[in-house]
């Protein structure tokens, strides 16, 4: 971590120039964030939840805003090119020229946070406060005052520099036909951004959101993202995040979602970039009949590190959760999976299922998996499973015995392993895009492009 | 076609094949019979180049080339095919992707143009139909959820697609009911040709009344202890393998 003194300078220098500075609501939010950062600090490996992910690398990272390249002639990823409502951020800063929100149906708003603040700081502050904050308290066992730690410091840091981000609200009963895309493009050699991503889906509404984090020339950048999600009664939100930054980038994100009765929150996270990338997903199933599907795929090689941490909190009865996280680790890569399911005393008839599988491609690849069930209700169905293993030698031999070269056979088996996660994605656009990105990553990992150009039988 | 000379092989340091000699000419079908554990599957794995099966002595020449110097996939591309005693399940890899990748790899090796998706589909449908396999079986993950008999048929489908010049069938009859056996045997017989040789490994005579061999060999405790014509199979059926001794004697 850059010295706190440096950060203090940065905070004092930048604050007056941030949008909405001087407006009471925003000043307070930023001051709160800064105070929280000072109180909690950057999590260390002594902190529960950060045991396996060491942030000492942050010490050498520039926390100053990035200096963007002037050239914006890069390709912008999309799950459905030309058919989405899109906000684009270059090195963390909203870029109106590259964005294409298009026509939104009545009841739907999609704004950059900066734009929202500039038009009305008071409204923006109100919106910001509407969203759940990640809870340091991730279980009943740790008691009401867990003290320092968890992601509090990072969330605080994000709050101290609150300026950029995206706010999507979908009004009651509205179905948004096209997906919303929030695209972060890194072009700078270094520098940090702290976006806030807020999604509010009102009762009975339905929307698909794809979040991209890519490098187009970007290097050792640091994205410190805080997300807030609210899914209203009976609403459906399908959310996918594609983290594909440069191998030198640092990516730390947390998203906190609340899901109301009979609502569904589906979230998928692909982690294939960054020297250190962590996504922390917290889902609170607050109303009877709420459900969530949390899935993740990652690929790490070199000496990269990927961390998928989740907390699924069954607060209400009759809720279901299903989590599938799978990853491939090569070289000296390291992956972390932490998945906790809490079933609170009132959450009878909970159906919770969790699966974590890692494929180790080298002797030096490493996985730390920590599945946890904390159950306080008696009439529940909960299961979890974790496996780590190598490629199936028998399957490899079978493929090779049919003439398939060894490296292609490996690529096929890796693709098969990860494709299972893509199958978890309900939305067809998101699923197809995830599959393609997984294939692309395997191609870079193995040097082999798997040919899946086989027509569907019956067509 | 295939010439095996004084082949010795070990698995986990234990000698399983103890000097096999066998010559198979183009168009011939040879059967290898023998008690369980005699080394039949080991021979098939050694010929197809499976890791962990170490050749300590001897040679195998296939169409004039040193077979043992080749990687598994190279042997397959050169025309060696093994129908597995236990075909492997591969979740997540569809039969179509698997076979298209395999077929095009083999075609590439032979200097033939690769098949595109439509050409491939046409071919596999025709071959599958002959084996009474439906579209559902072709598009499912390789052998996943297949019955024992379906797995064997799937292996024969692969053989029909790849058109090898030398096929080893390792207990292809095991786990098949009589109808499935006939279907598989028909599939195999339709591939018999003056250019294609086969090594049919079986424990029972039953298969050999459908796939009639030119020569029959008895493998016991790592050695071929007797060779003869197709009538040898019937004799073995009647007498069993007792006369070929016990492992200690070998
Ligand atoms: N992977 C292995 N490790 C150790 N021993 C093996 C292995 N595979 C086969 N064997 C041994 O080699 C011998 C021959 O086995 P196998 O070739 O499968 O016989 P068959 O196919 O004739 O029944 C047996 O004694 C068996 O136990
Ligand atoms: Mg056998």
Image (spheres, helix red, strand yellow):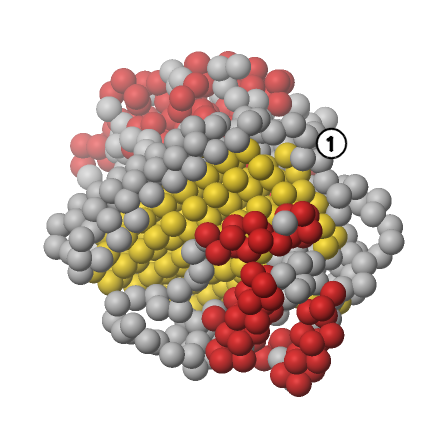
Residue B44 appears anywhere in the view: no
Q: Quadrant of the C terminus of chain B?
A: bottom left
Q: Position of residue B88 (x, y in %)?
A: 39, 41
Q: Is residue B250 toward the left or the right of residue A46 in the image?
A: left
Q: Position of residue A332 (x, y in %)?
A: 58, 70
Q: Is residue A89 toward the left or the right of residue A421 in the image?
A: right
Q: Residues within 10 Å of mark 1 (few under 14, many from 20)?
A: few
**Residue closer to the observer: B189 or A135:** A135
Question: Would you place residue B136 above or below residue A379 in this image?
Answer: above
Q: Residue at x 53, y 76 (%)?
A: A35
Q: Is residue A318 toward the left or the right of residue B90 in the image?
A: left
Q: Residue at x 37, y 22 (%)?
A: B184
Q: Quadrant of the N terminus of chain B?
A: top right
Give the labeled residue for mark 1: B111
Q: Residue at x 66, y 59 (%)?
A: A20
Q: Residue at x 87, y 50 (%)?
A: A71
**Residue closer to the observer: B184 or B249:** B184
User: Under tag 1, what secondary structure?
Assistant: loop
Provide the chain ID for the residue under circle 1.
B
Q: Position of residue B193 (x, y in %)?
A: 53, 20
Question: Would you place residue A210 above or below residue A52 in this image?
Answer: above
Q: Position of residue A222 (x, y in %)?
A: 66, 65
**Residue closer to the observer: A338 or B157:** A338
Q: Is residue A66 toward the left or the right of residue A242 in the image?
A: right
Residue A167 appears anywhere in the view: yes
């Amino acid at each position: 971590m850059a010295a706190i003194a440096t950060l203090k300078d940065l905070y004092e220098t930048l604050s007056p120039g941030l949008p909405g500075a001087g407006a009471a609501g925003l000043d307070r939010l930023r001051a709160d964030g800064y105070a929280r950062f000072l109180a909690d600090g950057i999590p260390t490996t002594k902190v529960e939840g950060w045991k396996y992910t060491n942030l000492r690398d942050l010490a050498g990272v520039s926390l100053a805003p990035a200096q963007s390249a002037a050239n914006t002639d890069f390709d912008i990823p999309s799950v459905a090119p030309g058919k989405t409502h899109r906000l684009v951020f270059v090195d963390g800063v909203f870029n109106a020229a590259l964005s294409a929100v298009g026509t939104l149906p009545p009841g739907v708003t999609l704004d950059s946070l900066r734009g929202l603040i500039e038009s009305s700081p008071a409204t923006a502050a109100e919106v910001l406060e509407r969203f759940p904050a990640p809870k340091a308290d991730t279980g009943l066992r740790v008691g009401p005052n867990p003290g320092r730690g968890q992601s509090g410091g990072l969330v605080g840091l994000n709050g101290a520099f609150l300026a950029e981000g995206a706010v999507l609200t979908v009004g009651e009963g509205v179905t948004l036909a096209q997906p919303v895309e929030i695209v972060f493009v890194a072009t700078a050699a270094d520098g940090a951004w702290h976006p806030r991503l807020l999604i509010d889906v009102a009762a009975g509404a339905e929307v698909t959101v794809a979040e991209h984090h890519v490098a187009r020339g970007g290097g050792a950048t640091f994205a410190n993202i805080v997300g807030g999600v609210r899914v209203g009664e009976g609403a459906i939100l399908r959310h996918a995040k594609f983290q594909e930054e440069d191998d030198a980038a640092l990516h730390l994100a947390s998203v906190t979602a609340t899901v109301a009765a009979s609502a569904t929150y589906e979230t998928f996270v692909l982690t294939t970039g960054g020297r250190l990338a962590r996504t922390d997903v917290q889902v609170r199933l607050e109303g009877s009949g709420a459900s969530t599907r949390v899935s993740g795929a990652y690929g790490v090689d070199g000496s990269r590190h990927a961390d998928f941490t989740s907390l699924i909190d069954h607060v209400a009865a009759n809720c279901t959760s299903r989590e599938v996280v799978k990853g491939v680790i090569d070289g000296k890569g390291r992956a972390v999976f932490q998945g906790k399911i809490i079933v609170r005393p009132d959450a009878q008839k909970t159906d919770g299922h969790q699966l974590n599988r890692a494929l180790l491609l080298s002797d030096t690849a490493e996985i730390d998996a920590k599945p946890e069930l904390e159950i306080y209700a008696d009439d529940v169905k909960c299961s979890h499973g974790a496996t780590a293993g190598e490629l199936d030698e028998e399957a490899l031999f079978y493929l090779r015995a049919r003439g398939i070269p060894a490296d292609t056979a490996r690529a096929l088996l890796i693709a098969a392993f990860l494709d299972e996660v893509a199958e978890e994605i309900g939305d067809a656009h998101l699923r197809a895009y995830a599959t393609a990105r997984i294939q692309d990553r395997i191609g870079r990992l193995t040097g082999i492009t798997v040919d899946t150009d086989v027509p569907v039988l019956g067509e | 076609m295939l010439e095996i000379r004084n082949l010795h092989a070990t698995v986990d340091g234990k000698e399983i094949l103890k000097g096999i000699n066998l010559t198979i000419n183009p168009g011939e079908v040879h059967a290898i019979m023998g008690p369980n554990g005699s080394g039949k599957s080991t021979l098939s794995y050694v010929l197809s180049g499976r890791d962990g099966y170490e050749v300590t002595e001897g040679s195998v020449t296939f169409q004039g080339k040193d077979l043992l110097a080749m990687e598994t996939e190279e042997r397959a591309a050169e025309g060696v095919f093994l129908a597995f005693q236990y075909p492997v399940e591969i979740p997540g890899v569809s039969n179509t992707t698997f076979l298209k990748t395999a077929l095009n790899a083999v075609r590439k090796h032979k200097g033939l143009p690769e098949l595109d998706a439509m050409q491939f589909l046409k071919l596999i449908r025709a071959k599958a139909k002959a084996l009474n396999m439906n579209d559902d079986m072709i598009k499912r993950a390789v052998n996943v959820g297949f019955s024992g008999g379906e797995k064997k048929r799937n292996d024969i489908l692969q053989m029909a697609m790849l058109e090898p010049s030398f096929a080893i069938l390792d207990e292809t009859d095991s786990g098949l009911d009589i109808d499935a056996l006939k279907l598989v045997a028909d599939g195999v017989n339709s591939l018999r040709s003056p250019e294609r040789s086969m090594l049919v490994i079986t424990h029972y005579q039953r298969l050999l009344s459908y796939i009639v061999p030119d020569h029959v060999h008895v493998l016991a405790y790592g050695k071929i202890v007797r060779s003869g014509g197709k009538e040898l199979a019937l004799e073995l059926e009647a007498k069993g393998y007792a006369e070929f001794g016990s492992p200690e004697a070998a």
